[in-house]
Each structure stands twice: as structure tokens, then as C-alpha cells.
């Protein structure tokens, strides 16, 4: 009784204390300031505002950060110029007597304020905006309009020319010093605008290239983003121009992100998915060519060449001495004066002595002028406009944008291996004529050589016609077949909407893969070999190279292009583009550094890396990917070849389903399809598909069940066999379940380091998925619910097919198969 009275007494005392004694508060008012040791939190507990001291700093600041994501990033700082002493424990953020929100130190001296009056409260919103309101609840001041070094989603970076207000980002002085540094990021004044990083507010340090209503054309990584969150709004009437980004309209898990300018002058775009730690998505500096004006005026920077700087054709180094030392900033000068400069008494249009040299795949130069008066679809008008003015040094005609011209030195040009724009550089007639004459001479010589070769070959062919007629016929048939494949593929690309698919230049892929070096080969499949590559901007890629004579390979190539270019999910491998040149057909994917799941699961030395948490995450990820294919994508897709080797792992061991060459689109109202081509991999095919050619989403679910049981046990369904019991893998797993020993299926390398409940759930799901009758198998919606413990499944039914096929050795059950070292694919009709 006495203990209860004491408890009630203390509860009563604490109820009388003002709110500032609590650790977290939801608003600041004149009577409730924010004190040391407290934090202001947003309603959804996403953001937090409070006092902090950077690492090893003797200063203290008021800042804002994401509440539960690490490493902690301070996205806004109030008193950047006036830090508090770290020993000051009496500092408060308060609304003063005049209604001004201010930060005061322990001596009640103001070190920062909003410079407003009559405010009533301050709150932190779930988007990270710190807002000060009046008594009526109207916004009077907000941190989004007073940025530090970071840009949050829906926050605006730009300026209002009418008021002179700039919302630019300013870097920290160092990692431990939030005071303003030397780098500033914002938008340029010209139209269309560019993103720029300046040193000390005026000297360009990095440039994005103009905005084309979809992306900054000088940032290749924006080309490969299949979902673009960025936008630039340019209101000419109001004189405002702002850049922002948002994930509100992008499906999938909730993303948190920030864009910041580092103390080294690098723009970084960071994101967190589902509350995980921060990950780097992209950054402005990839190579030395990203330094503004690295090669000076009329110089071109190529990160994949050595040396990286070269003069444009028709130009020579301004100083050979400096150029030889690797100091290229002085740039280049014309070798031959323009004709319009040497014939000033003639009209420019009448001479026609100058022309244009096309230079491809560029970040176009700085200081462009936008000819808004020209129609956006008139390339020739753009060319004539530039040619008619001797001061016009170059022009570019950009899709979605129109005509850009240059009247100043061409500065900060970078050439990419893919993407980029075409620039037409003005040159004198002599610079353009020389290669034409040389080409004409070489053409004449070449023609004579070819003519002699034809006459000789014709004579030889007639002498050996009878002996080689059969061989010649075969050769012509083969050549014709290859041509049919190539023409068919080009027609296919032209007739389908592959707008999300980027077309790569073949030469850039050769460079990226080191001419398809054997040291870069990642593997070999039915499609052909797969190579690792590195793009100049540092992005790693995987390149599938189609075997030049495989008809089935062409069909798979077309199928994969159509499907995966339009499928977007974090658990599906992302295709970046394709390349078709003559008989070369390539698919370019994001590179998965950990390769495929089988390289870990079936390797006695590596499989210990797959702890239970990783295995369970892989199972859940594959389930989400299949759920998307079957139910959530714009079309219903049956994969038809789900297996361990087709699950790729990214750098964090997250799974991505790959290889859509055999996938089929099924109409929404259609549950089953029948095929005469039974294709797939032994051990993963459902009974109704392997024996009758009938496939549906339940065929994939059967494969998923096999996959789940293999992940749990590190055993292969196709090669596991107990001779003493004469049972295969699935029957073995089912027997363990029926005997209450399902945990015995767990890979022994895990020891006792696993969750028993999660393992039991996964075994249960796996056995439900591999039931003989397709109707008994769950849907992927059911599977994901069971894996997340939202629902329980029924008891797996007794398997007739598994038992019947377990009384023989598995190899004798597949007499019409062709086997490889690791897996065998059904080839009764068509093989993989």
C-alpha cells in the first residue's frame, strides 16, 4: 500500500513539470522552449532537431537530421557562423518576447534568429521542413527557404530574380566544421538552366550541362535512371527557376533521400530504403574530366583515353610546352582561320566556305545560347542560323530542347563512351576538305584492289566450282540466316516501344570490356557469354553477348529486351541498354558484384557467408520480385526458369531475379497456357509443365518452392539422392516435415545460428509450393503473407508425383535430357 502511494506521488510531481523536461517534444512555444538534452521531432518520428557537436569539435550547433538512419547526416544547421561552446549546457531555442524565434547561449545572448516577429510556434514536419507559424497557423519562416548544404525531397534549389532571393547549397568548411565552406551549388542564369558548383561563389568547379526538360544532358548517370524523380521548373513570368526532386509518384517502398554538397565540392545523392543505412546513388565527380574546363578552350576531355585531353579537330595546343607537361587548361587554338574571317567584304551566306564537323557523345560546352524562335524539329534551320553568323562557333540540336548555339570559346567539353549529344563545330573549308580528298584517294585505291581480287576470285571459283558447290551452298545458307536474324532484330526494335532502353555504342562496350577479354568473362549460358565491363564514369556493367548463330538466342534476346526494359522492381535485375551492330547483339545490365546465388550456396568455402538472416532476406526478396511479375506489373509475366543460378546478388547480398529469355506474358484473364516447347531446368519444373507443357504462375511458384528448400539446406534438388531410402530431395524434405524434424533440413554450416520460427515458416512455404496439383499451391500473395507471418498456410498434401519419382535414381527419370556439369535443361523440344 505504501509503495503504491509513493508511485502515485511521484507520478503527480512529474505531471506538474513543464514539458521541456521530456526528451522529445513536438512543438516550440513561448512557454515551452527547446533546451539542451531535448529534441524536436516530426509527427511521424522521421526527422529530429536538436543540439549536436561534430566529431572532435569544441563547438555546438543547432541542427536537423533523420531520426533513425545512420550514419547521422545533419541536413540543416542554424548557427553555422556563430557556434556555441560545447561546454554551454544552458543554451535554448526559444520564442522571445517580440515573437522572434532565436537561439540564445547560457548568458541569454542571441547567436541566431529568424528575424521575424509575432510568431506563435515552431514545428518540424515529416518532410524535414522546420516551420515557424503565427497565431493563426500561417507559415512565417521555414528552413526549406534557408538551406545549408543539403537538399531534401520537395525542397527547391534555385532563385527568384524578382526578389533576388537565392536558395543555393553551401558546403561545410570541413567534415567537422559546419561553417560555410568555399563550394556553392545552384542553378545558372541562362536558359535552359544548368546545375553548377562554384568556388567562392564565382569560379565554376563543375557543370551538369543544360536541362532538356527531363535530365541534365551532361550527366550520363541520369540517362540510365528508369524512374526519374528530378524536375526543373522555370517560370519566366514570375522570374523563378527551381530544381527539385520527389519520390511521391514512384511506386515501391518508401524512400528517404538527400542531395548535399560536400566540403570537397562534390554533389552526392544519398538514399535510404525502408529505414536502412544511407547508400550512395550517384555523385557529381566521377573522373578528372568532371573538373570544369579540364582541357581548356576547344579541348575535349576523354576519361577513357591517355592522355585525357585532346584538341578538337582543326585545333592545335596553344602551348605545346604546357601541353606536354600535362597542363591542358590553356586549351587549343585554330589551325586555320575561318573563311568568313578572311573574307569580311563578302556576305557570309554567299561564300559557303565554312562547314561543320560533327563530334559525337559530348557534354556540350558552357555559355550556350538558346534560339527559342526556331521550331524544335528544325535541325537545318539551326545549322543555317549558325552558318549565317561568323561569330557562331558551333551548334547542337538537342532532343526535347531544340537549337543551342555558341558565340564564345568552347569550354568544358567532355566526351562519353555512350549517351551525350552531337556538337557541330565550325571549321574552315581546308580543314574539312583534306579528309575528303584522302578518303577519295583511298577509295579509288581500294576499289582497284577489290576489282583485281574479284577477277582473281572469279577465275578461281570457276576452276573449282564443281568440287566446292556443296560447301558454297552451305556458306550462302548460313550467311542468309545471319542476315535474316539481324534484319529481323532491327525491325523488332523499330516496331516495339523500348523507350526505357538505352542504345549503347559498340565501340564503347569494346572499351568497357577490354575487347571482351577472357579475364572479364563472368560466365556462359544458353544465350552466350557474359562479360564484366567498366564505363568511363566508373560504373560497372555486365554485358550479355548473343551467340551469332543461335536462332533461339535471337528470340530470347528480343523477349528479354521487351520484357525487362518495361519491368521495374528492386528485386529484378535492371537492364541499362542494348547494342546491335551487324551480327553483334548485346544486352547491358547493372553489374552484380556478388554474382549469382549458386556461387555461394554450393561452395563449401563460401556458403558460410550466407548466414540465416541473409538467406531469409534472399527468400523474401525473390518472393517480392515474383509477386511483382505475377500481380503488380503492367503485364502478368511467367518467368519459366526460376533457379538458384538466376538469382543475382548485389553488393549487400540483396537478390535480383535475372534471365528473362524464356519468360512469357500471359493475358490477365488467362490462367493456363500450353506450349510444345518445354524449356527450363531439371529439378525446377512443375509436373504439369514438364509432362504436359502446361504453364501458369503456379509453375513459377513450384520453382520458387524448390528454390526456398535449396536455400535453407544448401542442397541441389537435381543431384540429391538417398540411396538407402530411395528418395530424392523433395521427398526427403517432406518426410522431415511430417516427422516433425523440419529443422534438420537447415544447412549444418549455420549451426544453431538461425531463427527456428522463420525456418519452419520457410520450409512450410516451400513444401506448399511444390505440391503436385497446381491448384493446391499458394499464390505469391499468399506466400508473401506467410513469410511476413501475416497468415498461416494449410498442411502440405501428400505428394504422389514426388514419391513415384523417388523410387528411381533422379537421372533415370530424365532420359530425354542433356546434362551439363551443374544443371541440366529439358531438351525434348528445345534446349537452353
Image: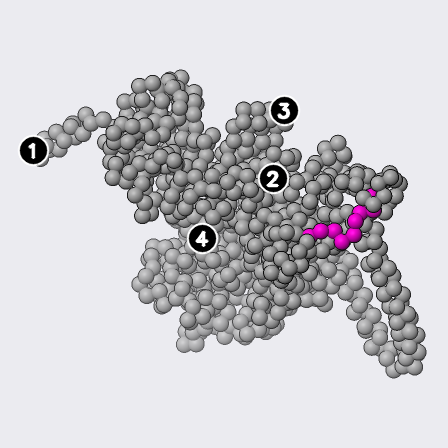
Marks 2, 4: nearer the viewer: 2
Residue 187 image point, x, y percent: 57, 37
Left or right relative to 344: residue 62: left
Q: How far apart in space, not on screen, are marks 2 and 4 (Cα)?
A: 42 Å
Q: How far apart in space, not on screen, are marks 1 and 3 (Cα)?
A: 75 Å
Please name whichever residue, 233 or 615, is drawn nearer the observer in this view of the structure.
Answer: 233
Q: How crowded is mark 3: few (under 14 residues within 10 Å), some or many (20 or more)?
A: few
Secondary structure type for disc 4: helix
In the image, residue 102 above or below residue 588: above
Left or right relative to 52: residue 316: right
Please name whichever residue, 293 or 768, is drawn nearer the observer in this view of the structure.
Answer: 293
Residue bearing mark 3 = 237
Marks 1, 2: nearer the viewer: 2
Disc on res. 194: 2
Secondary structure type for disc 2: strand
Please name whichever residue, 487 or 342, is drawn nearer the observer in this view of the structure.
Answer: 342
Q: Identify the mark nearer the N-term, 1 or 2.
A: 1
Question: From this viewpoint, is residue 82 visible?
Answer: yes
Residue 549 image point, x, y percent: 72, 67
Q: Identify the mark nearer the N-term, 2 or 4.
A: 2
Q: Quadrant of residue 558?
A: bottom right
**Magenta stretch, residue numbers:** 332-340
Residue 334 image point, x, y percent: 74, 51
Q: Identify the mark nearer the N-term, 1 or 3.
A: 1
Q: How far apart in space, not on screen, are marks 4 and 1 (Cα)?
A: 52 Å
Residue bearing mark 1 = 1
Which residue occupies 6% across, 33% down? 2
In the image, residue 689 above or below residue 138: below
Amino acid at each position: 500500500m505504501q509503495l503504491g502511494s509513493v508511485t502515485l506521488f511521484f507520478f503527480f510531481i512529474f505531471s506538474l513539470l513543464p514539458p521541456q523536461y521530456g526528451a522529445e517534444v513536438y512543438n516550440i512555444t513561448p512557454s515551452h522552449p527547446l533546451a539542451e538534452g531535448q529534441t524536436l521531432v516530426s509527427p511521424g518520428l522521421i526527422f529530429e532537431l536538436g543540439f549536436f557537436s561534430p566529431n572532435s569539435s569544441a563547438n555546438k550547433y543547432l541542427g536537423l537530421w533523420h531520426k533513425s538512419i545512420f550514419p547521422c547526416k545533419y541536413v540543416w544547421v542554424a548557427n553555422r557562423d556563430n557556434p556555441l561552446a560545447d561546454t554551454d549546457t544552458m543554451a535554448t531555442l526559444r520564442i522571445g518576447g517580440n515573437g522572434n524565434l532565436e537561439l540564445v547561449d547560457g548568458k541569454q545572448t542571441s547567436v541566431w534568429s529568424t528575424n521575424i516577429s509575432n510568431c506563435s510556434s515552431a514545428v518540424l514536419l515529416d518532410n524535414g521542413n522546420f516551420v515557424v507559424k503565427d497565431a493563426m497557423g500561417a507559415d512565417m519562416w521555414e528552413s526549406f527557404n534557408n538551406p545549408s548544404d543539403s537538399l531534401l525531397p520537395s525542397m527547391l534549389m534555385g532563385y527568384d530574380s524578382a526578389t533576388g532571393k537565392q536558395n543555393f547549397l553551401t558546403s561545410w568548411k570541413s567534415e567537422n566544421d559546419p561553417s560555410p565552406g568555399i563550394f556553392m551549388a545552384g542553378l545558372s542564369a541562362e536558359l535552359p538552366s544548368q546545375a553548377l558548383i562554384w568556388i567562392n561563389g564565382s569560379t565554376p568547379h563543375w557543370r551538369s550541362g543544360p536541362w532538356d526538360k527531363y535530365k541534365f544532358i551532361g550527366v550520363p548517370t541520369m540517362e540510365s535512371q528508369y524512374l526519374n524523380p528530378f524536375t526543373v521548373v522555370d517560370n519566366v513570368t514570375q522570374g523563378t527557376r527551381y530544381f527539385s526532386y520527389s519520390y511521391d509518384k514512384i511506386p515501391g517502398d518508401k524512400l528517404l533521400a538527400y542531395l548535399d554538397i560536400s566540403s570537397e565540392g562534390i554533389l552526392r545523392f544519398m538514399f535510404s530504403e525502408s529505414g536502412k543505412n544511407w547508400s550512395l546513388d550517384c555523385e557529381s565527380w566521377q573522373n578528372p574530366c568532371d573538373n570544369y574546363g579540364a582541357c581548356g578552350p576547344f579541348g575535349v576531355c576523354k576519361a577513357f583515353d591517355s592522355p585525357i585531353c585532346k584538341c578538337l579537330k582543326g585545333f592545335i595546343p596553344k602551348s605545346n610546352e604546357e601541353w606536354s607537361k600535362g597542363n591542358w587548361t590553356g586549351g587549343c587554338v585554330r589551325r586555320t582561320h575561318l573563311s568568313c574571317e578572311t573574307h569580311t567584304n563578302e556576305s557570309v551566306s554567299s561564300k559557303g566556305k565554312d562547314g561543320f564537323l560533327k563530334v559525337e557523345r559530348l557534354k556540350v560546352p558552357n555559355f550556350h545560347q538558346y534560339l527559342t524562335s526556331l521550331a524544335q524539329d528544325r535541325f537545318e534551320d539551326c545549322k543555317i542560323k549558325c552558318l549565317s553568323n561568323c561569330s557562331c562557333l558551333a551548334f547542337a540540336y538537342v532532343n526535347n530542347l531544340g537549337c543551342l548555339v555558341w558565340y564564345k570559346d568552347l569550354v568544358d567539353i567532355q566526351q562519353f563512351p555512350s549517351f551525350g549529344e552531337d556538337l557541330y563545330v565550325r571549321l574552315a573549308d581546308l580543314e574539312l576538305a583534306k579528309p575528303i580528298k584522302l578518303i577519295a584517294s583511298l577509295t579509288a585505291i581500294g576499289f582497284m584492289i577489290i576489282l583485281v581480287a574479284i577477277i582473281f576470285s572469279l577465275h578461281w571459283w570457276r576452276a573449282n566450282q564443281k568440287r566446292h558447290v556443296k560447301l558454297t551452298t552451305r556458306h550462302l545458307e548460313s550467311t542468309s540466316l545471319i542476315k535474316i536474324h539481324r534484319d529481323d532484330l532491327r525491325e523488332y526494335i523499330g516496331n516495339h516501344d523500348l523507350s526505357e532502353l538505352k542504345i549503347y555504342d559498340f565501340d564503347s562496350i569494346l572499351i568497357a570490356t577490354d575487347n571482351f577479354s577472357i579475364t572479364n568473362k563472368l560466365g556462359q549460358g544458353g544465350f552466350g557469354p557474359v562479360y564484366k565491363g567498366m564505363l568511363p564514369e566508373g560504373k560497372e556493367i555486365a554485358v550479355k553477348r548473343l551467340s551469332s548463330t543461335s536462332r533461339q538466342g535471337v528470340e530470347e534476346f528480343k523477349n528479354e529486351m521487351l520484357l525487362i526494359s518495361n519491368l521495374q522492381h528492386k528485386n529484378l535485375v535492371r537492364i541499362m541498354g542494348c547494342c546491335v551492330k551487324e551480327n553483334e547483339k548485346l544486352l547491358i545490365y547493372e553489374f552484380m558484384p556478388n554474382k549469382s546465388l549458386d556461387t555461394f550456396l554450393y561452395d563449401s568455402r563460401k556458403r558460410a557467408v550466407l548466414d540465416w538472416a541473409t538467406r531469409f532476406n534472399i527468400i523474401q526478396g525473390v518472393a517480392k520480385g515474383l509477386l511483382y511479375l505475377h500481380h503488380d506489373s503492367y503485364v502478368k509475366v511467367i518467368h519459366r526458369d526460376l533457379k538458384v543460378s538466376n538469382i543475382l546478388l548485389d553488393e549487400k547480398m540483396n537478390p535480383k531475379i535475372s534471365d528473362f529469355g524464356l519468360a512469357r506474358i500471359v493475358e490477365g484473364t488467362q490462367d493456363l497456357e500450353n506450349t510444345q516447347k518445354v524449356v527450363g531446368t531439371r529439378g525446377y519444373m512443375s509436373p504439369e509443365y514438364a509432362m504436359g507443357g502446361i504453364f501458369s504462375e503456379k509453375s513459377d511458384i513450384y520453382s520458387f518452392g524448390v528454390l526456398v528448400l535449396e536455400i535453407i539446406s544448401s542442397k541441389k534438388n537435381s543431384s540429391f539422392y538417398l540411396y538407402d531410402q530411395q528418395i530424392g530431395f523433395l521427398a526427403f524434405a517432406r518426410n522431415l516435415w511430417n516427422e516433425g524434424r523440419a529443422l534438420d533440413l537447415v544447412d549444418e554450416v549455420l549451426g544453431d545460428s538461425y531463427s527456428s520460427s522463420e525456418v519452419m515458416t520457410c520450409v512450410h512455404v516451400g513444401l506448399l509450393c511444390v505440391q503436385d496439383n497446381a491448384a493446391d499451391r499458394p499464390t505469391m500473395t499468399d506466400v508473401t503473407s506467410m513469410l511476413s507471418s501475416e497468415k498461416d498456410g494449410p498442411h502440405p498434401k501428400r505428394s504422389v508425383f514426388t514419391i513415384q519419382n523417388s523410387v528411381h535414381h533422379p537421372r533415370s527419370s530424365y532420359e530425354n535430357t542433356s546434362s551439363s556439369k551443374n544443371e541440366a535443361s529439358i531438351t525434348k523440344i528445345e534446349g537452353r
